[in-house]
């Protein structure tokens, strides 16, 4: 529920993933899930007010060693990119329950899926510009 007058921050959404509630409570305020998979969340650091995205390795694959290694490799790769079209990596960690996670900057804008849904087929020049990015 919003404070009177519609001002202020929305309350955090209820979470079903107990690991996230315990691990990030107090360090980050989880604001909402990003996408339907439940592995990405928009969050805010309560002291400095910085908005971030938190990605956790899905519980269904957390015990698979190959998946854990790919997750770490992805984090290392992202941390080296320094590209304006890729969110900066701020943190990597493992919860007390053994769930790996990364904290990245929030990217704003539309996904390619959203652009195509809104505009339909793109002119070749626009499609090439997106591919180059």
Image: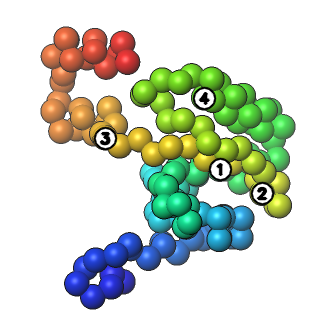
Q: Is residue 91 left or right of residue 82?
A: right
First in residue order: circle 2 vs circle 1 = 1
Residue at the spot of label 1? 56
Outermost residue, front direction?
A: 48
Q: Which mark is residue 16?
A: none
Within-10-Å neighbours for mark 1: few <14, some 14–19, many 20+: many
When asked about the image quadrant of residue 28, the answer is bottom right
First in residue order: circle 3 vs circle 1 = 1
**Residue 89 vs residue 40, the one in the foreground:** 89
Query: SS for tag 1?
Result: strand
Q: Residue at x 47, y 54 (%)?
A: 51
Q: Which circle, 3 or 1, is nearer the viewer?
A: 3
Residue 57, image x and y in percent? Answer: 68, 47
Query: What distance separates the C-alpha of mark 2 from that of mark 1?
Result: 10 Å
Query: What distance separates the C-alpha of mark 2 from that of mark 3?
Result: 30 Å
Residue at the spot of label 3? 109
Q: Quadrant of the N terminus?
A: bottom left
Q: Which mark is residue 78?
A: 4
First in residue order: circle 3 vs circle 4 = 4
Residue 97, image x and y in percent? Answer: 82, 60
Within-10-Å neighbours for mark 4: few <14, some 14–19, many 20+: some
Q: Which mark is residue 95?
A: 2
Q: Measured along the vertical axis of the image, is residue 130 above or below residue 15? A: above
Query: What distance separates the C-alpha of mark 3 from that of mark 4?
Result: 19 Å
Cβ–Cβ under 8 Å for marks 2 and 1: yes
Query: What distance separates the C-alpha of mark 4 from that of mark 1?
Result: 15 Å
Q: Which circle, 4 or 1, is nearer the viewer?
A: 4
When asked about the image quadrant of residue 68, the answer is top right
First in residue order: circle 2 vs circle 4 = 4
Query: What distance separates the C-alpha of mark 2 from that of mark 4?
Result: 20 Å
């Amino acid at each position: 529920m919003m404070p009177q007058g519609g001002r202020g921050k929305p309350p955090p959404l209820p979470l079903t993933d107990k690991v996230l509630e315990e691990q990030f409570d107090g360090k980050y305020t989880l604001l909402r899930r990003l996408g339907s998979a439940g592995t990405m969340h928009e969050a805010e650091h309560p002291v400095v007010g910085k908005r971030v995205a938190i990605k956790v390795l899905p519980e269904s694959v957390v015990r698979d060693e190959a998946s854990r290694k790919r997750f770490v490799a992805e984090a290392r790769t992202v941390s080296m990119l320094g590209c304006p079209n890729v969110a900066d990596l701020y943190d990597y960690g493992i919860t007390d329950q053994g769930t790996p996670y990364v904290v990245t900057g929030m990217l704003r804008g539309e996904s390619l899926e959203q652009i195509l849904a809104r505009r339909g087929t793109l002119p070749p020049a626009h499609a090439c510009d997106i591919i180059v990015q």
